Image (tube, helix red, strand yellow):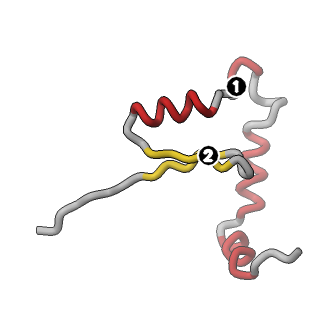
Amino acid sequence: MELNPIIKQALIIIDFIERYQRLSDEYSAEKVPSEERLVYVDKDEVFEILSKLGFEASFDSREKFFKIKEEFRFRMT
């Protein structure tokens, strides 16, 4: 499978590989003490918190991340 050329070019422009490597190095298991690492959080608990804060969210189980729908309203005068 080949990566879409438009996506590939965008990743090159933003220097994705270098940025990913820097973050990976900065937050590696060897550098971050276990008490400072993220712990597993139940997704239902996250949904409940987001709902209480007034956000509409969904969870992408394939990619393992939450999507938050945010609505902006403004008036032109």
Which residue reaches farthest left? Answer: 77
Circle 1 sits on which residue? 39
Q: Which quadrant: the C terminus?
A: bottom left
Amino acid at pointer 2: Phe
Q: Split into 4 quadrants, where in the image is the N terminus?
A: bottom right
- Residue type, numbered disc 1: Val
Residue at left offset 42%, top offset 42%: 55
10 Å neighbourhood of mark 2: few (<14), some, or many (≥20)?
some
Number of marks in the rendered image? 2
- Can you give x and y, in whole percent of width and height, for residue 45 in the image? 56, 27
Q: Is residue 34 above or below residue 68?
A: above
**The quarter of the displayed image where residue 38 is located:** top right
Question: Depth-wise, is mark 1 or mark 2 nearer the camera?
Answer: 2
Q: Which residue is mark 2?
A: 59
Whole-number angstrom distance, CA of label 1 to CA of label 2: 18 Å
**Of label 1 and label 2, which has the lower sequence position?**
1
Q: Residue at x 44, y 36 (%)?
A: 51
For this view, does 6 lie left or right of residue 69? right
Q: Residue furthest top?
A: 35
* Mark number, residue 10: none
In this rendering, is residue 59 above or below 74?
above
Crowd rating for badge 1 (residues with CA inside 10 Å; few <14, some 14–19, many 20+): few
